[in-house]
Image: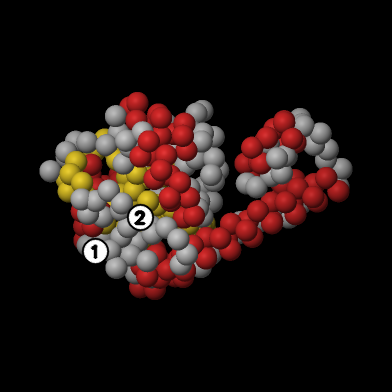
Amino acid sequence: MQPYVPFAPLTVAPDAPIDLQMHTTLSDARWTASELLDHVAGEGFALIAITDHERPDTVDEIQRLAGERRVRVVPAVEMSTTWEGDLCDILCFGVRPGPGDLASIAESTRSRQIENIRETYTTLRRIGYQFPRASELLAQQSGEPEQLDDLFALMKGHGYTEGAGPAIKAAGFTWITADLGEIVEAAHASGALALIAHPGRGDGFARFDAAQLDRLRAEVPIDGLEVRHPTHAPDQVEEFIAYASAHDLLVSAGSDSHGPPGVLPIKYRADSCRALLERLGITVG
């Protein structure tokens, strides 16, 4: 099965600006899909991917909004998993809308994430934290937290700034993820491509070296790596490019933008991801 890309075939120039990892309020970002699409349309991006966490169910709506603005958006999702005890995100490109194993994994993971967040919120209130401004601070969610950032927003908005992280963890917060192998298998079954997001990030996430990548590839048939990411130093980028080339892996490039005041989209060159785009039916030339 081929990856799902509703506008293929498409040809983009080698230097056409692309960004293959961005987020909206449909997961954990600060701007709505409409705001993000308005921004990239105004900036002249040739192609982007919106990779909201555990949200393959939004593919049709994103395509509708993108079509109104004449923006090309690769259907994609970022899935949460772990590898050797560290967090590890998987970018799936060419995600097919509708029911399927990947959609089921995403729905289950997201539901369990929201359940944990709300249980943590209930515990915080039970042990004495008060959040009278919850409806104001979380207006888009009707005052109910759904993401870790929501809990931090509530704590900060009510003056609980010192020790907020340890307090949230003590109240029961934990990272809810899915099995890496199951994610990749489900992605491949639907025709999607699965790449490791920000493999050099660290800070609670896996920071891969060649030996660790070898171990992962021995167990899971990953398609590639997001070699260009704001957390990657230039030497890491070169190391990941060399590793991908040596093992015939695809490479991607993404800003991981979550909107102002975070990192804004980055204009990567399309030819930096030529093989990936061609696998998606997009010609670079």
Q: Quadrant of the N terminus?
A: bottom left
Question: Which residue is outermost to the bottom?
Answer: 219
Category of crowding for the residue at label 2, using alpha-carbon neighbours closer than 10 angstroms: few (below 14), some (14–19), many (at least 20)? many
User: What x and y, as percent, mark residue 154?
Assistant: 72, 37
Is residue 20 toward the left or the right of residue 109 in the image? left
| Residue at 54% across, 34% down | 30
| Residue at 37% across, 51% down | 75
User: What x and y, as percent, mark residue 253?
Assistant: 32, 45
Let me know if residue 87 appears in the view: yes
For label 1, the residue is 247
For label 2, the residue is 93
Q: Is residue 68 above or below residue 51?
A: above
Q: Is residue 162 above or below residue 186?
A: above
Q: Nearer the viewer, residue 52 or 195?
A: 52
Q: Nearer the viewer, residue 70 or 255?
A: 70
Measured Cα–Cα span from mark 1 to mark 2: 20 Å
| Residue at 51% across, 28% down | 261
Is residue 136 toward the left or the right of residue 80 in the image? right
Three-letter code, disc 1: His
Q: Nearer the viewer, residue 205 or 42?
A: 42
Category of crowding for the residue at label 1, using alpha-carbon neighbours closer than 10 angstroms: few (below 14), some (14–19), many (at least 20)? few
| Residue at 38% across, 59% down | 96
Q: Quadrant of the C terminus?
A: top left
Residue 42 position by quadrant: top left
Is residue 78 toward the left or the right of residue 252 in the image? right
Q: How is the image coloured?
A: secondary structure
Three-letter code, disc 2: Phe
